[in-house]
Amino acid sequence: MENRIALMGIIVENPASVERLNAILHDYAEYIVGRMGIPYHKRKISIISVVLDAPQDVISALSGKLGMLPQVNIKTIYSKV
């Protein structure tokens, strides 16, 4: 299966979900090109962006696992390349 480039935007509203989120991302480390996390203390949330180079099914699986975490919101956009 051909790899796709994707940007996953993650907003974490529940600090208790961060440890599990990091564990899941670690499981997919081989597909992660880069990651940037921004703690937004004023709003008590964390904003994370993750760039992936992976097959479509891997990106979907990761998005699904992260989306099941309490108060974690995910949106994924894909490159046409």
Image (cartoon, rainbow, N blue to C red):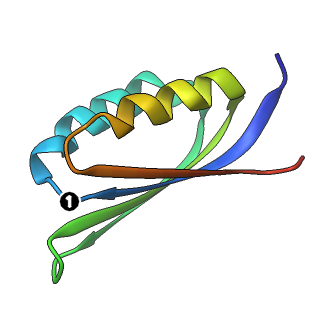
Q: Where does label 1 land, which residue?
A: 13
Q: Where residue 14 appears, x then y in whole percent? A: 14, 53
Seen from this angle, which residue lies furthest right? 81
Q: Amino acid at mark 1?
A: Glu
Query: How many marks can you see?
Result: 1
In screen coordinates, is 72 left or right of 58? left
Seen from this angle, which residue lies furthest top? 1
The correct choice, above or below, for 66 with respect to 14 in the image is above
Q: Secondary structure at mark 1?
A: loop
Q: Where residue 38 appears, x then y in whole percent? A: 34, 68
Q: Where residue 54 appears, x then y in whole percent? A: 69, 29
- What residue appears at the point 22 percent right and 33 percent down from the top-left corner? 20
Q: Nearer the viewer, residue 8 or 51?
A: 8
- What residue appears at the point 29 percent right and 29 percent down from the top-left corner? 23
- What residue appears at the point 21 percent right and 67 percent down from the top-left corner? 45
Seen from this angle, which residue lies furthest bottom? 42
The correct choice, above or below, for 44 with respect to 68 in the image is below
